[in-house]
Amino acid sequence: MANLQLGRELSARTLMFHAAIAEKVGLSATEHKTLDLLSRAGALTAGQLAELTGLTTGAVTGLVDRLEKIGFVKRDKDPTDRRKVVIKPVTEKMENEIAPLFTSMGESMEQLLSRYSTQELALLNDFLTHSINILQEETAKLQEITSEQN
């Protein structure tokens, strides 16, 4: 049970950290994490972004409008299908305004990880990978329940 409590505490502290980062640059936590998804994907359609975030396509449109207005994303034609629009992160703006806020955290986490052996790091990676999968599955279940109720 103590392990589950630690997981809850880690989750809460992670959420609060990212909310503080978001506030620092004038974003909501959802906008900030959407930018994180986009920065790793490179470019996504609104539908793909809705699927990844669990937001409705209408909510994604409003979110992208806000991010575009303040210069964090831009809309472009899909190079493979000119009828589609892809949302691309403006990486230079993210690197200038958001990335520096992670410097201290990155250094601290690197220092923490250096305490573990290769075998221990493999165990941590396994745990985190499976935790991510469980979170994705449980999120999908909640979204199905919500869509069935509507």
Image: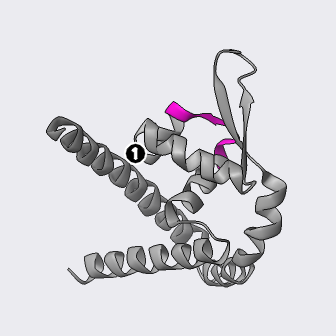
Q: How is the image coloured?
A: one colour
Residue type at numbered disc 1:
Gly
Percent of width and height locating residue 114: 66, 80
Whether 69 is drawn above or below 124: the answer is above
Tally of marks: 1
Residue at 53% from the left image edge and 66% from the top image edge: 28
Q: Is 64 on the left or on the right of 125, as rendered?
A: right
- Give the answer, above or below, for where 94 lies relative to 141: below
Crowd tier of the residue under label 1, counting other residues whose Cα lies within 10 Å: few below 14, some 14–19, many 20 or above: some
- Nearer the observer, 72 or 118: 72
Asked whether 22 falls inside the magenta stretch, the response is: no
Q: Residues in magenta?
A: 39-47
| Quarter of the image where the N terminus is located | bottom left
Q: Nearer the viewer, residue 93 or 39?
A: 93
Query: In the rendered image, which residue does mark 1 sit on?
Result: 54
Above or below: residue 55 compared with residue 104: above
Residue drawn where x is 54% and y is 49% of the image: 63
Residue 117 seen anywhere in this rendered image of the structure? no
Quadrant holding the C terminus: top left
State the SS at label 1.
loop
Q: Nearer the viewer, residue 109 or 20?
A: 20
From the viewer's perspective, is 134 left or right of 46? left
Q: Quadrant of residue 143?
A: top left
Question: Percent x, y for residue 23?
Answer: 59, 75
Q: Is residue 48 above or below residue 28?
A: above
Report the residue at 72% width, 54% height from top. Answer: 72
**Residue 76 visible in the snapshot:** yes
Q: Tell whether position 46 is magenta.
A: yes
Q: Nearer the viewer, residue 111 or 95?
A: 95
Q: Percent x, y for residue 90?
A: 78, 50
